[in-house]
Amino acid sequence: MSPLKLTGKKAVAAPGAFNAAAALLVEKAGFEAVYISGAGLSNSNGLPDAGVLSREEVVGLSSAIIKAVKIPAIVDVDTGFGGPQEVEKTVRLFEAAGASAVQIEDQEFPKRCGHLPGKTVVPAEEFVEKIKAAKAGRTKADFRIIARTDARATGGLDEAIKRGLLYAAAGADMIFPEALETKEEFREFAKQVKAPLVANMTEFGRTPLITLDEFTELGYSLVLFPMTAFRTAMKAMEEALAELKAAGTQKGLVKKMMTREELYRLIRYDIS
């Protein structure tokens, strides 16, 4: 897997992929990176984004996605699957699986979706130890450790900034403030935390919809679109199944489908 490259000129967009076929579409569309989100993996398996999947399950699901594409893959490992010793092991496993970066967050376990109420975070000093363990677990210098703080929801923007500074000082390669609520908050965070920054551009959450160009201007290097493809696909499938149920035929749906030939090209299946 190639390393995650951040030029500094324009923020890199990383759409979420919930399986290998979706990752192939991300790559085909010309994106420079793919994001394997905890929500995407959990929801696609009929589960909530609450740390339900085991580390072994996430490694297995992620490995299929990583192997399918040549672009860098960023993996959401939630709270790291345990304390510092387990975080170190987590990093080793995902680096071995071919990931280019992992994202770890400072929520207490069991975690909640970053845009839901009722989140709690661990003491900052405890999470600093996880960051140090993550650094100790990697063997490749270009493997990135992304530290996410959910403290905006629990202690306000000032607490999120304080933690961002601590996490950067502890050696995190990128800092990810989750669920900021305005462009002004993103701007202030970037003004205070002088490190490569990550933004989460999820839908239906606490963050307004902000464009990639706007995030570049605000000072962010990487923008995640974790559930855009998944939500779009689920809505399309829901509507297609409703039509199939009502009509008893897929005739009206064929024009909306990827053809057999298009699918075979996507998965690199040569039938000639």
Image (spheres, helix red, strand yellow):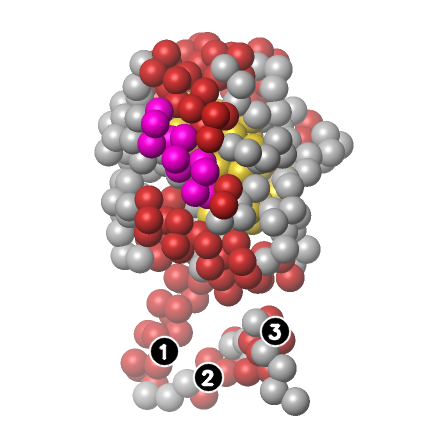
Q: Which residue is mark 2?
A: 252
Q: So how many labels did they put on this image?
A: 3
| Residue 265 located left or right of residue 162 | right
Q: Nearer the viewer, mark 3 or mark 1?
A: 3
Disc 1, SS: helix
Spatial distance from mark 2 to mark 1, Cα to Cα?
A: 8 Å
Residue at image coords 30%, 19%: 122
Where 78 falls versus 68 (above or below)?
above
- Read off the residue under disc 1: 243
- The Cα atoms of the two marked residues, 3 and 2, are separated by 28 Å
Residue pointed to by mark 3:
268
Dominant secondary structure, magenta:
helix
Mark 3 is surrounded, within 10 Å at the Cα level, by few (under 14), some (14 to 19) or many (20 or more) other residues, namely: few
Q: Which residues are magenta?
A: 84-94
Asked if residue 54 is positioned above or below residue 210 in the image, the reply reads below
Instruction: Identify the residue at horizontal 49%, vertical 45% (top origin).
Output: 96
- x and y percent of residue 265 in the render? 62, 75
Q: Which residue does the image show at 45% across and 20% down from the upper left?
A: 132
